[in-house]
Image: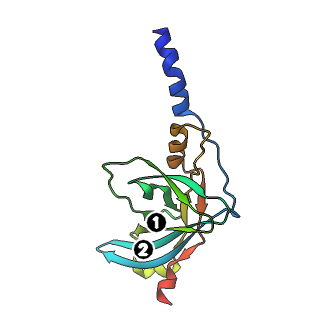
């Protein structure tokens, strides 16, 4: 029994280890978001947002994301606006690369119950949990950074009044 517990101890420690903050260098990677359109269905309103992750460096940018639940890497700074999720039935880590000087674009849907009459004063920022791949660490370490939300890059403020200009 003692040998068995010594065998599982390193696995337990690696699964529960603290993951430190990783700061992103704005000279190397820039995250931005812009409003697209909006729709309304009953009491739920959706705002469509185009996000961009731009590689400013001279090296290929390699980061992790999930194959199905990639939207979980996004958040907002306003509790009235939530990034939608889609149920996943097959999900796993995926390594994504952005060549030097190139941009990766994605489209997300942000839902709210805020009435349209109040949209002129509403605003939010979109955050992206950037998890650069660390080849010196194991898979568990790298994947844990996808859900810890410790490396969030924030967009500029998106103001819904821009829909009425």
Give me the residue at 47% from left, 84% from top. Answer: 163
Q: Earlier in the sequence, mark 1 or mark 2?
A: 2
Task: State the SS at label 2.
Answer: strand
Which residue is nearer to you in this view: 136 or 73?
136
Task: State the SS at label 1.
Answer: loop
Q: Which residue is mark 1?
A: 80
Residue 24's disc is none
Give me the residue at 40% from left, 78% from top. Answer: 38
Residue 55: percent from left, percent from top: 62, 64
Q: Is residue 103 left or right of residue 49?
A: right
Q: Quadrant of the N terminus?
A: top left
Residue 18: percent from left, percent from top: 60, 37
Which residue is nearer to you in this view: 85 or 40?
85
Which residue is nearer to you in this view: 76 or 8?
8
Give me the residue at 30% from left, 74% from top. Answer: 41
| Mark 2 surroundings: few (<14), some (14-19) or many (≥20) residues within 10 A | some
Q: Is residue 31 left or right of residue 4?
A: right
Q: Is residue 16 left or right of residue 56?
A: left
Q: Given the current orientation, which residue lies at the most extreme bottom position?
A: 165
Image mark count: 2
Give me the residue at 56% from left, 68% from top. Answer: 103
How is this picture coloured?
Answer: rainbow
88 lies above or below 125 = above
Residue 31: percent from left, percent from top: 59, 66
Residue 47's disc is 2
Camera-near label (1 vs 2) is 2
């Amino acid at each position: 029994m003692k040998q068995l517990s010594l065998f599982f101890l390193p696995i337990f420690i690696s699964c529960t280890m603290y993951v430190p903050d990783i700061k992103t260098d704005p000279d190397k990677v820039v995250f931005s978001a812009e409003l697209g359109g909006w729709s309304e269905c009953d009491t739920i309103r959706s705002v469509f947002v185009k996000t961009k992750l731009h590689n400013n460096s001279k090296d290929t940018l390699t980061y992790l994301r999930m194959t199905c639940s990639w939207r979980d890497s996004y958040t907002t700074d306003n509790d009235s606006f939530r990034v939608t999720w889609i149920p996943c039935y097959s999900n796993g880590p995926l390594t994504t690369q952005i060549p030097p000087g190139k941009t990766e674009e994605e489209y997300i849907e942000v839902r709210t119950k805020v009435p349209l009459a109040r949209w002129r004063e509403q605003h939010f920022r979109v955050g992206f949990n950037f998890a650069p791949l660390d080849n010196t660490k194991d898979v568990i370490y790298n994947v844990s950074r996808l859900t810890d939300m410790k490396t969030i890059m924030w967009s500029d403020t998106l103001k819904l009044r821009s829909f009425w200009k």
